């Protein structure tokens, strides 16, 4: 079973210039579909003295760790002569900055995504070079959007211009991947044994954990105890979620996901993300909360229409309010993740301090299908390299890939260009 990053694991090579122990930086990219109600997303004031609008209000407790980035764009998500298919292009371009070849066949082509550029450079330092998560299932073929392959909409990470890195949407499978020994026969046997005797994965490593605990200092003991408690809580919530059937009011569509409850599913996946970072199992994660064009309904919010359906709001105020509610639902889940990361202490700071998390989508207003003025947040402080707690407004149509280049610099991953980038995004420090 993986361990959290303990201070005793940090060798002399990890010492910063001032002699302090330097914890690894982590990056994550979270995607939301169908744009946002931008009037309820964008703060009115620029700089550090700004109030969070309706959609971002769930992030109030983490405002000092948040940067709202206004004015970023993905030009290659535009048609550029290829006609309809904005949802497929939005997904495919989000981390690549490249134009997707319009095909529903096997000859897909896009570009290497920023997460995989990072994973190729720093992935050898962890058990997994990267981790790909989704709240949707895997789809690698078929026609999903106006002649574009489903591979474009159901994958964020691309290992090469022709090869996506398919995400995992089953929290149980992610959990086993993180906390098993990767031998399929033993993974299957261990899970069967746990299910049969209703034991936690912790029960199988308790003796070793107690032996290790006796060799640790007080700070590392606390971290180990907190971590093992967190693992057990995730196990219990997975068991409860799997046993709870969906209970939808009449007329509502069953949400897609595992477990049946969408919020429970998202939070379990966010638990996996937090645990993967906490254990330093990987430092690069992508998470597709829902693919662009998703028509999931949100009965929990009193919204029976599908998300994609009402994103074509035609400036109808009631529909725009429903879009804002869905957007706020997603930022509420983001706040849940930030709380998890902030609760993990790393030296004098927290795990959140050592993260850079991009949260946003490849469409601005879902009604217009525009790919400029995108809803984008950057969360975390990148190990002290990002100045947060601000609303930054950039010139309209500034390539979002410029942000990625700046993030790679902070990860010590040199890159001259990503997709349509034109340089570094200035002003983050």
Image: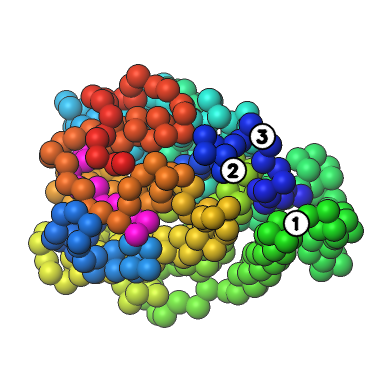
Q: Quadrant of the C terminus?
A: top left
Find the residue positioned furthest to the front.
18
Q: Identify the residue shown where x is 24% and y is 65%.
A: 52
Residue marked by disc 1: 217
The residue segment tinted magenta is: 64-73
**Magenta part, dominant SS:** strand
Residue marked by disc 3: 12
Image height of 373 relative to 352, above or below: above
Front residue of 42/45: it is: 45
Q: Is residue 161 magenta?
A: no
Q: State how far apart marks 3 and 2 are (Cα).
A: 8 Å
Residue marked by disc 2: 21
Q: Residues within 10 Å of mark 1 (few under 14, many from 20)?
A: few
Q: Are marks 1 and 2 in contact (CB under 8 Å)?
A: no
The spot of residue 338 in percent (x, y) is 46, 60
Tell me the element at label 1: loop
Image height of 351 relative to 112, above or below: below
The answer to which quarter of the image holds residue 418 is top left
Q: State how far apart marks 3 and 1 are (Cα).
A: 17 Å
């Amino acid at each position: 079973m993986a361990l959290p990053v303990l201070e005793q694991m940090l060798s002399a090579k990890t010492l910063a210039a001032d002699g302090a122990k330097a914890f690894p930086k982590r990056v994550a990219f979270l995607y939301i579909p169908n744009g946002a109600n931008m009037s309820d997303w964008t703060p009115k004031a620029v700089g550090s003295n700004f109030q969070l609008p309706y959609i971002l209000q769930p992030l109030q407790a983490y405002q000092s760790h948040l940067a709202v980035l206004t004015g970023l764009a993905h030009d290659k998500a535009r048609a550029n002569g290829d006609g309809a298919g904005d949802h497929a292009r939005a997904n495919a371009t989000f981390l690549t900055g490249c134009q997707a070849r319009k095909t529903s066949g096997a000859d897909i082509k896009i570009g290497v995504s920023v997460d995989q550029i990072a994973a190729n450079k720093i992935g050898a330092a962890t058990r997994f070079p990267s981790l790909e998560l989704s709240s949707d299932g895997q789809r690698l073929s078929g026609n999903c959007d106006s002649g574009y392959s489903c591979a474009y909409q159901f994958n964020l990470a691309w290992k090469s211009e022709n090869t996506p890195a398919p995400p995992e949407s089953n929290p149980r499978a992610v959990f086993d991947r993180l906390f098993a020994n990767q031998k399929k026969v033993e993974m299957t046997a261990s899970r069967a044994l746990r299910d049969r005797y209703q034991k936690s994965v912790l029960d199988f490593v308790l003796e070793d954990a107690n032996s290790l605990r006796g060799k640790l200092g007080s700070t590392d003991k606390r971290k180990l105890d907190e971590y093992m408690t967190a693992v057990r809580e995730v196990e219990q919530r997975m068991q409860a979620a799997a046993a709870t059937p969906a209970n939808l009011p009449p007329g509502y569509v069953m949400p897609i996901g595992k477990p049946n409850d969408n919020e429970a599913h998202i939070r379990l996946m966010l638990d996996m993300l937090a645990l993967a970072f906490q254990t330093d199992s990987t430092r690069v994660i992508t998470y597709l909360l829902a693919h662009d064009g998703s028509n999931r309904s949100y009965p929990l919010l009193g919204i029976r229409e599908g998300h994609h359906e009402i994103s074509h709001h035609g400036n109808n105020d009631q529909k725009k309010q429903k879009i804002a509610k869905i957007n706020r639902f997603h930022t509420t889940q983001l706040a849940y993740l930030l709380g998890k990361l902030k609760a993990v202490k790393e030296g004098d700071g927290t795990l959140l301090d050592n993260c850079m998390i991009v949260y946003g989508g490849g469409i601005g207003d879902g009604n217009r299908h525009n790919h400029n003025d995108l809803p984008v947040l950057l969360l975390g402080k990148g190990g002290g390299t990002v100045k947060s707690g601000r609303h930054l407004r950039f010139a309209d149509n500034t390539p979002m890939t410029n942000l990625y280049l700046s993030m790679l610099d902070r990860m010590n991953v040199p890159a001259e260009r990503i997709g349509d980038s034109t340089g570094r995004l200035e002003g983050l420090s």
